[in-house]
Image: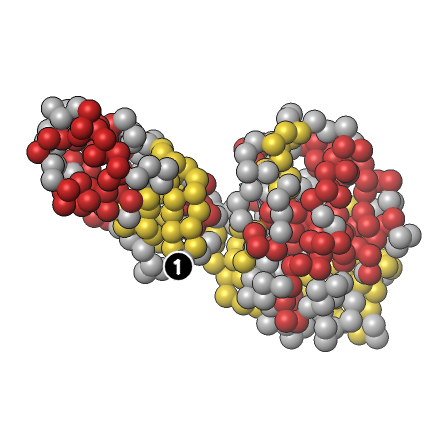
Amino acid sequence: MQQWDVIVIGAGAAGLMCAIEAGKRGRKVLVLDNGKRVGRKILMSGGGRCNFTNMYTSSENFLSQNKHFCKSALSRFTQWDFITLVQKHAIAYHEKTLGQLFCDDTAKDIVDMLLAEAKAANVQIALQQTITGVSFADGQYTVTTAELSRQCHSLVVASGGLSLPNLGATTFGFQLAEQFGLKVLPLRAALVPLTWQPSDKAVFEEISGVSLPVTAEANGTLFPEDMLFTHRGLSGPAILQISSYWQPGDEVVVNMAPQTDLVDFLNAQQQAHPEQEVKTALGKLLPKRLVEKLLELKILVNQPLKALNLKTIKQIADSLHGFIFKPNGTEGYRTAEVTIGGVDTDYLSSKTMEAKQQPGLYFIGEVVDVTGWLGGYNFQWAWASGWVAGQYC
Ligand SMILES: Cc1cc2nc3c(=O)[nH]c(=O)nc-3n(C[C@H](O)[C@H](O)[C@H](O)COP(=O)(O)OP(=O)(O)OC[C@H]3O[C@@H](n4cnc5c(N)ncnc54)[C@H](O)[C@@H]3O)c2cc1C
């Protein structure tokens, strides 16, 4: 039987960070992963450039049943700590927007950095491992694969969420949590495009490709970013963000001209160009294909601006400032970036990430009920939770 101090399950962002930190403490660490290579999500993240953190990370950027849980880890390993590590490895990066930091070159730089750190900390990594069982006796965990059994004092579960099943996502971590008596909160796909009702699909798929800056709101939360019409529904950062707050049956309220007071705008246009048509005036603010679609749907009526009275102007403004979509659902785990829900944080120590009732068992990263917004926050949670567990496991 192989003996290890620490076995980490999952060679993703959180697992590698934890293994590095534990290895630096002199622990004998093995990382097991079911895939052919490490950090597969890192490699494909951020369009291949990995949005590895966000300069403005705070606990406000996360969803969790206990919104305070993430504070401890986030404050002990901050975005600035990760940036220092990136700088130490001379990886070129830039801020794309809203504090989101991306590699200039490729996400592989981040994976190579983690592998170099892991090597320096004597971390061993075994890939293509199919774990068939985990048991606990006499203060030791036994992790069994088809080939052999391995024992360890500390078992760290970093097996991630359910998104992108073809990239190795499994329910392993959630099942293991339940096996050891931890509660798992309901799971759902998030940071995911929303899909049309069949009737809306027939109407809107013609304008797929149209994109515009909006605010999208659901359940009292609002995101100002771009929205994209697709063949299947709505996407773009504003929609991905709001998908984390959207529940089946909810409406999404979209302000299609968030920067402009449309009553003022149309009044001014009417004064300046009374003969101009509504279509032309609104075409100055909104994509033309969208305006034509709204005319076709009779949400707008095309007439000279001089024919509009204040009531009609207000109606136009209201319909565009508060356009209501009622999505059918989401595209699901196939395209979702993250999974909401997971191991209930009530069962974990926020200081160490160890299970309160099960000594030596740790949960980190996305498998835990902490989900970040779009914009580098999910990786920052993976680094931070992995780092803290690595100090104790
Ligand atoms: C397309 C895409 C793009 C993204 N872009 C960004 C971005 O730019 N910025 C950002 O902050 N977040 C991004 N995310 C989210 C981010 O990738 C995750 O939140 C983060 O990877 C979670 O880290 P983790 O270590 O918890 O899990 P993961 O990185 O998912 O790692 C889990 C590992 O465990 C392995 N595993 C699973 N089950 C088993 C098992 N049974 N046995 C052994 N191994 C197992 C998996 O193969 C995987 O290697 C993106 C996600 C996707 C899907």
Judge from the rendering whether residue 172 lies leftward or rightward of residue 328; answer left or right: right
In the rendered image, residue 13, in percent from the top left (x then y), is placed at 68, 46
Could one spot residue 9 in this view of the protein?
no
Quarter-of-image position of residue 274 = top left
Task: Please state if 192 lies on the left or on the right of 380 as rendered.
Answer: left
Residue position for label 1:
219
Residue at the image position 65 percent from the left and 75 percent from the top: 181
| Quadrant in which the N terminus is drawn | bottom right
In which quadrant of the rendered image does the C terminus lie? bottom right
State the residue in front, 44 or 52: 52
How crowded pointer 1 is (Cα within 10 Å; few <14, some 14-19, many 20+) is rated as few
Is 308 in front, or is 129?
308
Q: Residue furthest right?
A: 26
**Left of 305 or right of it: where is 63?**
right
Q: Amino acid at mark 1?
A: Asn
| Residue 318 visible in the current orientation | yes
The residue sitting at the front extreme is: 271
Q: Position of residue 191 (x, y in %)?
A: 48, 48
- Identify the image quadrant of residue 116: top right
Q: Mark 1: which secondary structure?
A: loop
Disc 1 Cβ-to-ligand 1 distance below 8 Å: no
Image location of residue 231, percent across then percent down = 31, 38
Tag count: 1
In the figure, 257 relative to 274: above or below?
Answer: below
Residue at 38 percent across and 44 percent down: it is 215
Up/down of 163 relative to 102, above or below: below
Q: Residue at x 67, y 59 (%)?
A: 71
